[in-house]
Every structure is written in structure tokens, then in C-alpha cells.
Image (cartoon, grey):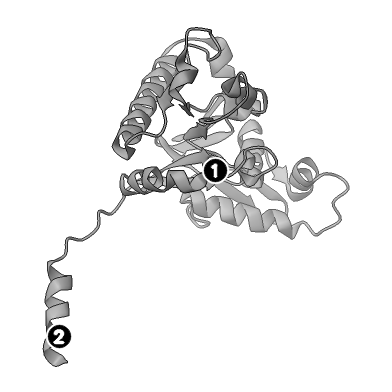
Amino acid sequence: MQKQAQEMTVFDMSSPMPEVCEMTRRIIIVSPFPGRMHELMRTLMEACFDVLVFHRWEHSEAGALQADLLIFDVSGSQDEDPVGAFRENMHPVHAAVPTLFLVDEQMLGTDGSIAAHEELLVWPARPQEGLHHVRRILRSEAVRTSDIEASTNIEHLRDQLIFKDLRIDRRRMTVYRSGARIDLTKTEYELLLQLIEGQGTVQTREDMLNRIWGTQYFGGSNVVDVHVKSLRKKLGDRVGQSLYVATVRGVGYRLAD
């Protein structure tokens, strides 16, 4: 028994340590047959992606989550234009998120049923092929975003808010710190947006409460403090040495100097 335990110890010590992901990106997969996604999901997770799988897009938590890439499985669909059907049900916020559609080979006909600009992958396919497509799409998106940010497009600049090393993309409702995305809840996002739009003016707890929770909310203003604390934590901010959110004692909050 002791010998067996020693052998087990030697085996464990010689096994390679799993790769530690320094940064992950979120992928949402929507498929009516999620069991067919297991190998793709495992391959993506091993490549340092956070993967969530849902049966349906409509009326599910999927539509309320932020993602770096969406994968829709429309293979086997009987709809005349399954890709178009998904596009119609998308919220404008998600319409800007890069999307990969898994399709049947016969859907690639010349009848124009699928728009030529869509990213498509004939399914089923090898998981590594799926990973290749994901990486290529995200690289292309990064280059496109960089080109847009380098341009002087006034409409785009109007959708961006910059404060120190924070950047808010209001079109996508996303926040970045030094280029790395920060996942905020809707409430945390709206609190940060209010502070930055205020351009340093003091935002009272009552103002923040009314704007975000509405005038019909009858809870105490301490709910603001709870969410600001959570926001600070995600931003890596400190109360004593505030980089982003400063407390105005007895009143509320403002942007830090």
C-alpha cells in the first residue's frame, strides 16, 4: 500500500502543470444541441477562453451577458435564412460583437441566402479548426478596432469616453483599463459612466440613486456605496489612494484628481 502511494506521488510530480491563463476572453456559444459543442468548448477553454453555452439566445441569460465573440450554431436549421433570423433578434449592443455562424455545407449555395460578409464555419468540424477561426476573427477585430481608434471619425469619438487609462465604449457598453477589458455589471457600468460624464463634478448619492435605480426606488442610499465599492475593486482602486473614484464625505462621489 505504501509502495502504491509512493508510485502515485512520483506520477503526479512528473505530470506537466496545466497552463495558467494570464488573461481570458469570453465566448458565448448558442446551440440547440449543446452536446455537439463539448469538444469545441474544451479546446477553446484550453486555449484560455471562458466559454458559456446556451440552448437558446432569446429569453435566456445569454442576451444579457457581454462577450468578445458569439458563436451561433444554425446547422440543421429549417429556416430559409437562419443567419438573418439570429441577426433580427440581436440587441444593437451585441450586433457589433464579432460573430461566427456554424452552418451546413448546403447553406453555402449561391442563392444568396447567407450574406457574404458573415463569418461561417461548416459544421461539424475539427475543434482545432474552430479555434483557428476564433483566433483569426478576434485578430481581425483587434486590427479593425485599432484602425478606427486611430482615425478622426467624429461619430466614433462621440461614442468613446476616456479618463486616465480607462476607456468606455458606449456603443458596446464595455470598459477597458490599459487596453484590457473589465467585466462590469450594468449597475457598475452606469455608475462609472455617470461619474465620467460628470467631468469631475460631485455626484450626490441621491443623484446617483435617482438616475440609476429610478425615483420609485425606496431603498436606502447605502446601495450606492455597495456598488461603488464593487466598482472600485474591479478597477483596482483604493479608497485611501483613489485613482478613479474619490469619496466626498457626507455627500457622494466624484472622479479622482
Q: In the image, residue 186 lies at what x, y percent? A: 64, 43
The answer to whether mark 2 and mark 1 are in CB contact below 8 A is no
Give whichever of 246, 151 is nearer the camera.
151
Asked whether residue 221 appears in the rendered view, the answer is yes
Q: Is mark 1 on a helix, strand or loop?
A: loop
Q: Which residue bears the numbered disc 1?
A: 256
Q: In the image, residue 96 lies at what x, y percent? A: 55, 24
Q: Which residue bears the numbered disc 2?
A: 4
Q: In the image, residue 142 lies at what x, y percent? A: 38, 25
Q: Residue at x 44, y 11 (%)?
A: 151
Q: In this view, does 232 lie above or below 164?
A: below
Residue 107 left/right relative to 144: right
Q: Distance between the residues labelled 2 and 1?
A: 60 Å
Q: In the image, residue 240 lies at what x, y percent? A: 50, 57
Numbered disc in front, either 2 or 1:
2
Residue type, mark 2 in image? Gln
Q: In this view, does 169 lie above or below 148?
A: below
Q: Is mark 2 on a helix, strand or loop?
A: helix
Name the quadrant containing residue 55: top right
Q: Which residue is drawn at 59% across and 56% down?
A: 229
